[in-house]
Image: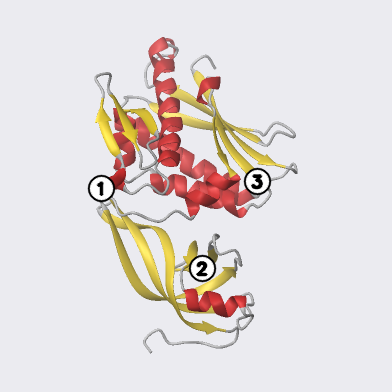
Amino acid sequence: MANSQKLKFRFGVDSHSVDLSVLVETLISTSEIIDYIHGYYKYDNNINIKIGAPVKGSLEIDLELIHAGFKTIRTIFTNDNISIISTILQNFIDLYKLYKFLINQPKEEVKKTENSNNTITLTNSNNNTITINTYVVNMYESGRIKPKIDRTLNAVSEDTDINEFTIETPDPEQKFSFSREDIEMAINAEETIELGEQIVTRKAELILIRVSFDPRMKWDFWYSNQKISAKLNDKEFGESIDKRIESFHKGDTLTVELRIKQVYDNELKIYKDTSYQINKVYKHNKVGTQTNLLE
């Protein structure tokens, strides 16, 4: 269609397959970010996202964004509508660029300079700079974007066959990539607390799904009726794993002190969990044993 454009995701892999969970998480978070950008500008019409079939061998996903108006067909096919879609795609790419730029950068060490052309130049602790549209910076600082990108990169990181994650639009200059090293650095970055965020800790029992013996990677658990990924930050328990004192089986549970990062959702008026970390493992419960959280 004349008023549609495509957003492409390329999963750099050696094989011709990619884990389904990677595709699902990427599509969900992408849809949520695009909806947020669209809502930020308060456009009158809707954006419909259509998923194209992957091109054989390339492992690329096409998201076709169609500006669907409530007026006549003639109104839909206008330069203004195409411009709106281009703006949304540009903002989407810029949000990912800003995310990458701010990895492991404490907020207080990032200098902001407002420019006269509605852009902001950010300078990080390494004296690197990036110039981004002011609206994009405002959207990122809302706290609503980073958790969605985190979710995508967490899913991508779990597929060890993927060595690169690339996003493209019809404009070749907007092509943007995360290397495997970038992805691992992002998911293991030290967390900082921004406006509208909070940290809570609670005693919890986690059902073990997947163990990672790489200290840089997260473990997978079933917690509170959902699958979560959490970094193990208990040095003593980690050493017992290295010494082969601990062994694991599917269905084991860990009784832990769980650190939960939450972001305030202005629409729902609640704090929503965005990331997890295990501060302390109190007990490793083997299959067939049970524990009382009130002990």
Q: Is residue 86 above or below residue 148?
A: above
Q: CA distance from mark 1 to mark 2?
A: 27 Å
Q: Is residue 45 above or below residue 230?
A: above
Q: Is residue 68 visible to us here?
A: no
Mark 3 or mark 1: which comes first in sequence? Answer: 3
| Residue 137 falls left or right of residue 53 | left
Return the x and y of residue 12 as percentages of the image width and height: 66, 39
Tell us which disc is closer to us: 3 or 1.
3
Q: Is the C terminus in the top left, top right, bottom left or bottom right quadrant?
A: bottom left
Secondary structure of the residue carrying numbered label 2: strand
Q: CA distance from mark 2 to mark 3?
A: 24 Å
Secondary structure of the residue carrying numbered label 1: loop
What residue sits 64% from the left and 52% below the top? 159
Say few, some or many: other residues with alpha carbon within 10 Å of mark 3 (under 14 / 14 to 19 / 20 or more).
Answer: many
Q: Nearer the viewer, residue 145 or 238?
A: 238
Identify the residue under disc 3.
162
Return the x and y of residue 66 as percentages of the image width and height: 48, 24
What residue sits 32% from the left and 37% below the top? 139
Q: Is residue 42 above or below residue 19?
A: above
Mark 1 or mark 2: which comes first in sequence? Answer: 2
Identify the residue under disc 1.
266
Q: Amino acid at mark 1?
A: Asn
Identify the residue under disc 2.
222
Return the x and y of residue 197 as percentages of the image width and height: 28, 54
Q: Amino acid at mark 3?
A: Ile
Q: Is residue 132 above or below residue 209?
A: above
Disc 1 and disc 2 in contact, CB within 8 angstroms: no
